[in-house]
Image (cartoon, rainbow, N blue to C red):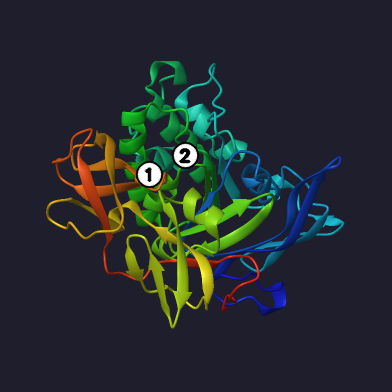
Amino acid sequence: MVAARPEERPGDVELNVVGVTKRFGATVALDAVDLTVRRGSVVALLGPSGCGKTTLLRTIAGLEAPDAGVIDVAGTVLSDGPSVVPPEKRRIGMVFQDWALFPHLSVAANVGYGLPKAERRGPRVDEALALVGLVGFGDRVPGTLSGGQQQRVALARALAPRPSLLLLDEPFSNLDASLRVSVRSEIHALLLDLGITCVFVTHDQDEAFVVGDEVAVMRAGRVVQHGQPQAVYDEPVDEWVATFVGDANLVPGMAADSLVTTAFGSVRPRGTTVVDGPCTVVVRPEHLRLVPTHDLPGGSASGTVQRVESYGHDHVAFVALTDGMSAHSREAGSSRWRRGDRVVLSLVDVPMAVFPESGTGTSGT
């Protein structure tokens, strides 16, 4: 989704970021970033450490002043060059990575901290605690709560002022693995019920795909791809995005007449990329199948199973090919493969992302 100028913004857009740039000395943290978020949707900012995700969140919140660009929320310009609305007047809620709870204050006092003084002990606090399932916890202090409960207190504090936009910075990173999965499911369900517009930062692809209605992938201070999770997974804009948003085998191929030939078989290109000549095919592990060599003796891509990783609901087999390359396959259920098994590899018949080698082919829009 391409960001629009404020005067051109569609009526259902809650957040519009256009050409936002932020430098810290010689370091360009944000490089003319564009981002549009529709009202009531949840957008995940996904990218590696240092790509600018948190800086973008902080500029939206008003905690950092951008050097250039426009930020508007619900049609109100919050930042436009020298004109900057202070954070306390932005009607934006933010949950920090470390939750930033005051250990000496009660849960109720933490939740009411951002409210006008007259409302800090009123129904607004009780309403926020009820939203996150913490009725009756108001007199507790954060240190007596579990990690998941503390995370929900931080969320309640952000929701209490009834913001038009909610920002979450790595909201689940301080939780252990098992708790992270359950809490993110709870928070996802809550966000859907509230219908609040939300942007959250993560470096975890699973988290982004589970919680985000849309995913904006960031790299080196720019949003390089923005779309629905499945579209980003199926049609990555380049090889870097393909490997960052999911597991992938990057397989060499030769394209001609709308068909790409690889060692594993032929494949149809996905999307609008026009390729002719040498190319790279993004083969997801679930699109690669293994069979015993005696079942398909004529297969050209054969190899030896090096190891198998089982996850209960599925498994991944890693194969060393006879030509010196390697590949891995993911299949449902338990594995029939053991280390040392000889196998032949073949492709599932689905379109796949294909990228031409430099100087060959063109990418459509």
Crowd class of label 2 (few under 14; some 14 to 19; many from 20; radius 10 Å): many
* Of 218 and 4, the residue lying toward us: 218
Q: Is residue 160 visible?
A: no
Which is more N-terminal, label 2 or label 1? 2
Please say if 155 is above or below 351.
above
> Does residue 350 appear to the left or right of 222 in the view shown?
left
What residue is shown at x 44% (from left), y 66% (from top)? 353
Crowd class of label 1 (few under 14; some 14 to 19; many from 20; radius 10 Å): some
* Of 216 and 268, the residue lying toward us: 268
Residue 321 percent coordinates (x, y): 35, 46
Residue 184 percent coordinates (x, y): 37, 41
> Does residue 86 appear to the left or right of 262 in the view shown?
right
What residue is shown at x 32% (from left), y 60% (from top)? 264
Q: What number is the disc on residue 155? A: 2
What residue is shown at x 17% (from left), y 56% (from top)? 297
Q: Quadrant of the N terminus?
A: bottom right
* Residue type indicated by callout 1: Ile
Find out whether the residues at labels 1 and 2 contact each other: C-beta distance under 8 Å.
yes
Q: Quadrant of the C terminus?
A: bottom right
Q: Which circle, 1 or 2, is nearer the viewer?
A: 1
* Of 228 and 147, the residue lying toward us: 228
What residue is shown at x 51% (from left), y 42% (from top)? 203
Q: What number is the disc on residue 159? A: none
Based on the displayed image, in which of its 4 quarters is residue 319 positioned?
A: top left
Please say if 4 is above or below 312.
below
Q: Tag 1, which secondary structure?
A: helix
Q: What number is the disc on residue 187? A: 1
Mark 1 and mark 2: Cα distance apart in space: 9 Å
Q: Tag 2, which secondary structure?
A: helix
* Residue type indicated by callout 2: Leu
